[in-house]
């Protein structure tokens, strides 16, 4: 989602310092690392599921391993900064890192996390998208815990009143339906999404590009940039047309997740692009004026016949610090946390989408976590990682800037992708030269 980004130069250039302001929760108290103690970092968990699972592991594992939970900042940019500082200082004391789906390539390229390829024997039972994001140069560096993907929410009741029985299959259909339903119902906005200049805006921009057949990097050679293409131009033109034609309000160029889901939950929009968490807010009287029965969920539309729907992959994962002296104990904890039973608990109690394929056939999960059922096809088949590159931090900043400028009409889509082609290729070439 919308984390703060830092540049590659900043990422690689800061040395020294220690982690500051960490809060120690759960596990056994006291100082650092007796035999069998594993230090685990993760952001705050308001659901309480994570601390409970750690407590259960400590009680039941039978191998003398004790996990201690270090709570990190909820802002993933700040969390990232703290990890970087610790890595640059020599690795630090964290053994297991709970981290964002976009971190593995950067961490792996710098030798900061462990290659798990030989340990991870059941990787084929996990969803393809999260596993792609954990893979760098053919090796697996993390184990997915839960996943996110962009979904299309729509007012099923309003579509039916205007004569529509199905959600739109193409962006042109969404445009047509949104304008008609907006006129029929008096709802202020036809479509809202994340258009601000930040990571969420990058996710949305990529989805427009992907669903028109474009791409950013060559899948076979991630050092080759492909973004300057007719397909990418078409994707950004479609995004801009939503504002130009009055489907989306001009203010969508400043919207992040909260502003866009707020408009939809207030009943002020027909369609919404957002993450699975929004469904948990529907029907909550403190957050929503609409009821679950009024809302439908579908995969994102495509640019035209024959195109594939894609949604941007999000989610959180487990990594092992390469400097840890407790890698075997760390792996035992990760293995346990990512077994089906624990992933199911996280889904049922935390409303987080599991990363194992089999749980999307689990009747209890599908019954009690509706978004898992409603978003099943989009999550399993259509989620796609952002460009997997050790230079992603800088690439993200450049894409956020150009996607935003294109959406606002400050530059043409053609100019935006042409600029990005040069900027992204230069970042990669400079990075390769510096490391090699």
Image: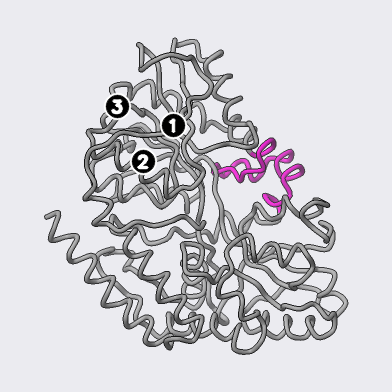
Q: How far is disc 2 from disc 1 in space, using C-alphas? A: 9 Å
Q: Which residue: 34% across, 81% down?
A: 228
Residue matched to label 1: 22
Q: Quick one: quadrant of the C terminus?
A: bottom left
Residue 63 sits above or below residue 355 on the image: above
Residue 172 sits above or below residue 158 on the image: below
Q: How far is disc 3 from disc 2 in space, using C-alphas? A: 17 Å
State which tag comes first along the sequence, 2 or 1. 1
Q: Main secondary structure of the magenta part?
A: helix
Residue 170 — which label? none
Residue 351 sits above or below residue 289 on the image: above
State which tag comes first along the sequence, 3 or 1. 1
Neighbours of disc 2 within 10 Å: few (<14), some (14-19), many (20+): many
The number of discs equals 3
| Residue 278: image location, x then y, percent | 68, 55
Q: How far is disc 3 from disc 1 in space, using C-alphas? A: 18 Å
Residue 324 — which label? 3
Mark 2 touching mark 1, by CB under 8 A? yes
Q: Which residues are magenta?
A: 347-373
State which tag comes first along the sequence, 3 or 2. 2
Neighbours of disc 1 within 10 Å: few (<14), some (14-19), many (20+): few
**Which residue is at the front of the view, 411 or 110?**
411
Q: Which residue: 43% across, 42% down?
A: 99
As for residue 342 lying within the magenta part, the answer is no
As for residue 354 lying within the magenta part, the answer is yes
Q: Can you tell which of label 3 and label 2 is closer to the viewer?
A: 2
Q: Which residue: 76% across, 44% down?
A: 367
189 on left or right of 250: right
């Amino acid at each position: 989602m919308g984390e703060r980004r830092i540049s590659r130069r900043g990422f690689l250039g800061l040395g020294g310092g220690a982690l500051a302001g960490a809060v120690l929760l759960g596990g056994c108290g006291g100082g650092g690392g007796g035999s069998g103690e594993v230090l685990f970092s993760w952001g705050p968990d308001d659901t309480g599921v994570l601390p409970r699972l750690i407590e259960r592991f400590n009680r039941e594992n039978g191998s003398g391993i004790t996990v201690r939970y270090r709570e990190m900042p909820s802002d993933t940019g700040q969390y990232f900064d703290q990890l970087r500082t610790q890595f640059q200082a020599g690795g630090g004391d964290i053994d297991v890192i709970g981290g964002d789906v976009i971190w593995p390539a950067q961490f792996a390229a710098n030798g900061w996390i462990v290659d798990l390829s030989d340990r991870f024997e059941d990787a084929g039972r996990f969803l393809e998208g999260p596993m792609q994001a954990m893979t760098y140069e053919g090796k697996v560096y993390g184990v997915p815990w839960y996943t996110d993907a962009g979904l299309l929410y729509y007012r099923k009741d309003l579509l039916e009143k205007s004569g529509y029985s199905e959600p739109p299959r193409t962006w042109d259909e969404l445009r047509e339906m949104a304008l008609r339903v907006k006129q029929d119902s008096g709802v202020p906005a036809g479509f809202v999404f994340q258009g601000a200049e930040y990571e969420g805006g990058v996710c949305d921009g990529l989805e427009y590009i992907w669903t028109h057949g474009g791409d950013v990097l060559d899948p076979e050679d991630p050092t080759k940039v492909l973004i300057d293409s007719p397909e990418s131009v078409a994707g950004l033109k479609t995004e801009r047309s939503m504002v130009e034609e009055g489907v989306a309000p001009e203010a969508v160029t400043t919207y992040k997740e909260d502003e866009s889901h707020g408009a939809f939950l207030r009943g002020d929009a027909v369609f919404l692009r957002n993450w699975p968490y929004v469904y948990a807010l529907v029907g909550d009287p403190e957050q929503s004026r609409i009821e679950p029965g009024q809302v439908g969920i579908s995969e994102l539309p495509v640019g035209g016949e024959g195109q594939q729907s894609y949604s941007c992959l999000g989610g959180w994962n487990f990594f092992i610090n390469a400097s840890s002296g407790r890698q075997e104990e760390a792996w035992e904890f990760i293995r346990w946390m990512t077994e089906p039973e624990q992933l199911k608990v996280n889904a049922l109690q935390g409303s987080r989408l599991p990363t194992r394929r089999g749980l999307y056939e689990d009747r209890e999960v599908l019954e009690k976590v509706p978004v898992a059922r409603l978003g099943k096809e989009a999550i399993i088949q259509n989620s796609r990682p952002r460009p997997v590159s050790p230079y992603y931090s800088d690439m993200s900043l450049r894409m956020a800037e150009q996607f935003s400028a294109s959406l606002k009409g400050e530059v043409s889509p053609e100019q935006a992708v042409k600029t990005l082609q040069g900027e992204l290729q230069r970042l990669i070439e400079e990075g390769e030269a510096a490391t090699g």
